[in-house]
Image (cartoon, rainbow, N blue to C red):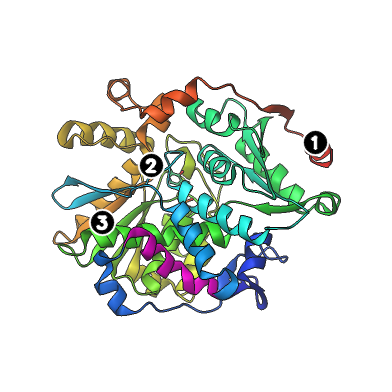
Amino acid sequence: MQYYSLQDPQHKASFETAVVQGIAPDKGLYFPERIPALDPDFITHLHTYTDQQIGYEVIRPFIGEEIPEAALKQIVNDTLHFPFPIQKVTGHTYALELFHGPTLAFKDVGARFMAGCLGYFRRGSTRPVTVLVATSGDTGGAVASGFYNVPGVDVVILYPSKKVSTLQEKQLTTLGGNIHALEIQGTFDDCQRMVKTAFLDADIQSHRQLTSANSINVARWLPQMFYYFLAYKQMKAAHPRLVFAVPSGNFGNICAGMMAAAIGLPVSHFVAATNINDTVPRFMQNGQYEPGKAVPTLSNAMDVADPSNFVRVLQLFGNNLPSLKEKFTAYSFNDKDTVRTMEQVWKEHHYMLDPHGAVGYLGLQKYLAGVPDLTGVFLETAHPVKFEDTAPKALQDVIYTPPRVMSLYGKEKEATLLAADYDVFKKWLMR
Ligand SMILES: *Cc1c(COP(=O)(O)O)cnc(C)c1O
C-alpha cells in the first residue's frame, strides 16, 4: 500500500517510509492511497475468528507485501495479547474496556504495533532510530512499554515536571535500557514545542534519525481499527448496528473507527465526545475550524485544541461536511458533567468510569436520547486508577488497584531534569 501526503497528493511513500518518517517532508499526514474493502463473509463470520486473526485480516491490506505474513502475524499477536471485554453498563449502553494492556490505557495497542513494525524495518540496521515523543501522561507510558528492548530503537520521552500523575510518571521513568525520560521544567506545550523544533533541526537529523510515535504515525493510528472489530465481534449477535462513542483528543482513535467502517464494518453512527476543548464540536456546528489554546481538564489526555487527525476524518468524507454529519456527531462536556457522571454511574450501575470514559459515556447518552431503539458502545480508554489522584474522594476509596500497578510504586524513578530550553535539550540530544 502506498500512502500520500494530505498536503500534496502527488507525494507518495511506502508503508515503511511512512512509518519511519512519521510525517511527510511537507508536514502533511500520510493517508492510504485507496480504501481497501474487506470480504463481507469475513464480517458475517467475525465471531468465528480469534482476536489475533481479526487483527491480521484487518491490517494486512494496509501493509501489503512490505512485511511478510509470518512477521506481521507475530506483530499482531504481540499487540493483541490482552483482552478487550465489553461490559453492560445500562440497558442500551456498553463499555468497551481498552485498559487491560500493560500501561492501562488504549494507547498500548498502537504503541506496541508501531514498535513491532519499526523493529521489523530496522532489523539488521546499524544506525539506530530515535523515537522522540512529548507526553501529557498516557502516550509516554505506552510508548516506553511498547518500545522497551526493541533492537535498533532508542526512545526519548519529554514530560512536564509535576504535571503527570504519580502512576504515569512511574510508567515512563522506571524501565531504563533504551528508554530515556526527560523531565522538563515546563508545560506539555513546552515539551511539544521542543520536540517539533528538533524534527526541523538539520544538525540533529544528521546526528540521529528521528521519528515520532504519536497518532500521526500510520502504524500507531491504523491498528486502532482493531477495537471496533473486536467490539462488533462480541455484540453482533444481539446488536448488528452499533453506535460508537469515543472520548476524543487528537481524534486518532475515532478516525481509526471511521476507517474500520470505510473498509466494511457495519456501524450506524460515530459520536466524538470532547471535554471543553471543543474545536471539533464547534466546527460541526458552524463549519469554522478555529483552534484556540488548550485548556487543562480532568480528562487531560484530551486537552487538545488542534486535533491533528481531524484532517484524516475530513478526508474520509471527501471534505464534505453534510456527508460527514450523516455519520458523525460531536459533543463537548465540562468537568462538572464529568465528575457528576462518574459518581452517578457508580451509584446507579456500579460501574467505575475514568474521566475520559465518563466523557464518552455522556456523548453516547446524549446521542441515544434522540434514537432510543439503538444500542451503543462507548470506549473506556483508561483504567480509573490512572486518574485516581483527581477522582472525587468517595470514589478514590473504591477504585480497584490492579496488582501490576502496586509493584510499579516501589520502583525507582530515573529521569533527567532539564530546563524548558531548546538549546539545553539539543545539547542533550547531540551528546
Ligand atoms: C489519548 C487518550 C484519549 C484521546 O485519544 P485520541 O486518539 O487522541 O482522540 C482518550 N482517552 C485516553 C485515556 C487517552 O489516553
The N terminus - image quarter: bottom right
Residue 408 appears in the rendering? yes
Going by the image, does 166 lie left or right of 47?
right
Mark 3, secondary structure of its residue: helix
Going by the image, does 287 lie left or right of 65?
left
Q: Is residue 60 magenta?
A: yes
Q: Amino acid at mark 3?
A: Tyr
State the separation of the CA atoms marked 2 and 1. 35 Å
Main secondary-structure element of the magenta-colored stretch: helix
Ligand 1 is within 8 Å of the C-beta of the residue at disc 2: yes
> Measuring 32% from the left and 54% from the top, which residue is drawn there?
245
The quarter holding residue 20 reads bottom right
**Labelled disc at residue 367:** 3
Going by the image, does 173 lie left or right of 70?
right
Q: Count the marks.
A: 3
Magenta range is 50-64
Counting from the top left corner in percent of width and height, residue 369 is at: 19, 55
For label 3, the crowd category at 10 Å Cα-Cα, with few meaning under 14, some 14 to 19 and many 20 or more, is many
The relative height of residue 58 versus residue 400 in the rendered view (above or below) is below
**Labelled disc at residue 428:** 1
Camera-side residue: 385 or 406? 406
Counting from the top left corner in percent of width and height, residue 209 is at: 76, 54
Q: Are marks 3 and 2 in contact (CB under 8 Å)?
A: no
